[in-house]
Image (spheres, coloured by chain):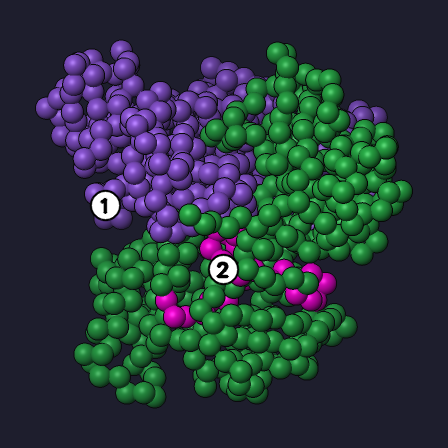
Amino acid sequence: MGIRVENLRKSFGTEQVLDGVNIEIPDRSFFSVVAPTGAGKTTLLRIMAGIERPDSGTVYYDGKDMTGVAVQDRSVGMVYQEFINYPSLTVRENLASPLEVSDENYSREEIDRRVEETAEMLQISHILNNLPEEVSGGEAQRTAISRALIKEPDYLFMDEPLANLDYKLREQLRSDFERLFSEQDTTVIYATPQAGDALAMSTHIGFLHDGNIIQDAPRDEIYFHPKFLPVAEYLGEPPMNVLSGTLTEEGDRRFFELRDGTRISVGTASGSFPSLSPGRDYELGFRPQDMTFVRNGNGTAVKDEDETLIHPDLSFVETVGSTSTLHLEYQGKEIYALNSEPVHLDPGSTLSFALDPGKLYVYDPATGDLIATGHKIPSFSQ
Amino acid sequence: MSEIEARDIRHVYDQGTEDETVAIEHINLTLEDGSANALLGPSGCGKTTLLQIISGLLQPTEGQVLIDGEDVTDKPPAERDIAQVFQFPVIYDSMDVYGNLAFPLRNGGVDEAEIEDRVHKIADLLEIEDILHSSPANLGPELNQLVALGRGIIRADTSAILFDEPMTDVEPSRKLTIRRRVKEAQQEFGITALYVTHDQHEALTFAEKVAIMKDGKLVQYDTGENLYQNPVNTFIGHFIGSPGMNLLNCGLARENGAAYAQLGPHSVPLPSGIHSEIDSSWTDCQVGIRPSSIAVQVADPKDETHYVPATVNQVEMLGGYQIITATLEETDVEVKARVAHDFAIEEGVNVWLSFPPADIRFFHQQQAVSAA
């Protein structure tokens, strides 16, 4: 019951919002469409659901062309950012309403059974007899989701459903969604600008950029092997750091020489990056949590014997709980480092971080394509 | 800049009617001169009510607001010299950014040379020099929010600045930058600031001390580190941290004077400093530990003691790291633990968890038990 989208185009006036989108959404996946606000996520969802018509292109459900089929003739549920519930009906009546107005003549017993089951699944059994205004924001959103799920649709479309919620509720629902949908037959298509939400819940992620899904892949694949710079720089909190450098060679050893002359050792020619050419420029990506903070007694910069260090200036520290996010200034760019211990240092200090060559991402500066990385996609085998 | 004090504040809406509701009560809060503070709490906890009372938009039913020791409870907002930055930036489209920044000074009759000096100083700090002559209508909500902030702090006699959920309209990817400039401006000018938000991340990164409210009461006013390390009750433990502290209902066991939290068949040693504070007859006890404090290993630790076997039933990737949820063997107790973003783990795997005693917190009837 997957969805395939081919060459979808949509423009509003002179603005080409979707410019030949292709996606493959596997059956029963939790597929997130990720992009900044205004990139066309909602339009893409509406077209896939059948609420809006594309200018051209085809939408297949389970291999069948659905492009011209009206939304009411599809097995879809919708959840929006603004939770929509009938204010004068109880939560129970809200849940039952899609079944009661359906052409399928559900029996009273069937309706009651589904209401009870769905309410239990979304943990709102205790508020079934309340009016929507009497329940919390999280419960109202769960009610809206229950209504979308009660007809057991093959496809559930959610457009930023957590955007209006307190962070504790987001955290809870994020965790609940991941559990709930991994046990459901429903294929979920979820739009969000929040990389963190998408990474936490999805089995698959598609990144929308300039009117195209430039990469869609299983979650771990797109996170550990982002094929293009814009994907790499968006899918992470904080985002991946990127520096420009030239590959140089000295005897058998290879280095990335950064713009300030700092050299990062990447091993021998036959080692880490055999496909790269000495003398060429590259963009180097590295995640903030892959930078190892190297400190001497007073926390200042240390001598670099292995040539794996960069020495950025600390501009700002944000500490939340046990984790510090260090805002660093390096070669005129802002980069971030994530440290799993709180850091108490003054802005202005020059610090040292080791970069593990095995965790670098190398991108082509002209095309933004991923050329090489030592990062493996973690896989568990006992 | 000034010290702001809320003393014995109580506020009741619709007093004397059948809709009467107590919004906040027993609020005592002193914001030190020049300090950065946040007011954090779930929706409906009363934080907006308190903010409005401090700014003067609302008169409290009981209690006083003092600025540098002077009672200003009866003074209107304009006489308190408290600047406010709202959820959605209030900007005048008829003027350029320069005009917006200069507006409060021109109203105050400041001469143009000083205005120019002040505008450039603020613009430099907020890194908005390049848009001084742009029209706000052409700028995004982030830049407009910076302009609103600049206007709030431009007057030299501002006693404090209050922020009411200022990041609501800011694009997620821009929040980090905007937050940083706000923070730098606060530090540079030494402005007493109160930042209201329901987002702990914003609160903890902005403020030196955070006041957490729940159900109209102030629960804990403390540094981020203390809120995280030493929550006064289970609510704070859960509320601070993402995910929050694991709070597990437990039994008590004693052996040779030492105290253990009992989770089914598993004994977890409690920190030695609180052994003497614990009464073995207590019921309604909770043991607390942060997900980041739990050590997770996949290999059987064999003879090492105090590793608790568990089965992973959920793995969430949170960008910077992964959170696993695991059920302790022979119990239905679920624990969340943090592991690195590239730690190889999946659902169904057996793991061993260790709970370092120094990082264990203990609660009796949801209240923290601490060393004497």
Q: Work out whether A58 lies above or below B90.
A: below
**Alpha-carbon span between mark 2 and mark 1:** 26 Å
Q: Is residue A341 above or below residue A183?
A: above
What's the magenta region? A184-213
Q: Are marks 2 and 1 on the same chain?
A: no
Question: Label 1: how many residues lie within 10 Å, few (<14), some (14-19) or many (20+)?
Answer: few
Tell me the chain of label 2: A
Q: Quadrant of residue B109?
A: top right
Chain (purple) = B
Residue closer to the observer: B274 or B241: B274
Categorize mark 2 by other alpha carbons within 10 Å: few (<14), some (14-19), many (20+).
Answer: many
- Residue A340 lies, in percent from the top left, at 52, 30
As drawn, the chain in green is A
Mark seen at residue A203: 2
Q: Amino acid at mark 2?
A: Thr
Q: Is residue B10 magenta?
A: no
Residue at numbered disc 1: B332
Q: Residue at x 70, y 17 (%)?
A: A302
Name the residue at 46% across, 38% down: B339
Q: Position of residue A324 (x, y in %)?
A: 55, 29
A4 left or right, relative to B65: right
Task: Give residue A132's position: percent from left, percent from top.
Answer: 32, 61
* Residue B64 seen in render: no
Residue at the image point whose x is 40% and y is 44% from the top: B324
Where, quadrant-wise, is the C terminus of chain B in this rendering? Answer: top left
Q: Quadrant of residue A52?
A: bottom right
Identified by mark 1, the residue type is Asp
Residue at 29% x, 62% y is A121
Say if residue B261 shows up in the picture.
yes
Quadrant of the rendered structure where residue A353 is?
top right
In the image, taking residue A225 as reference, residue B273 lies left or right, namely: left
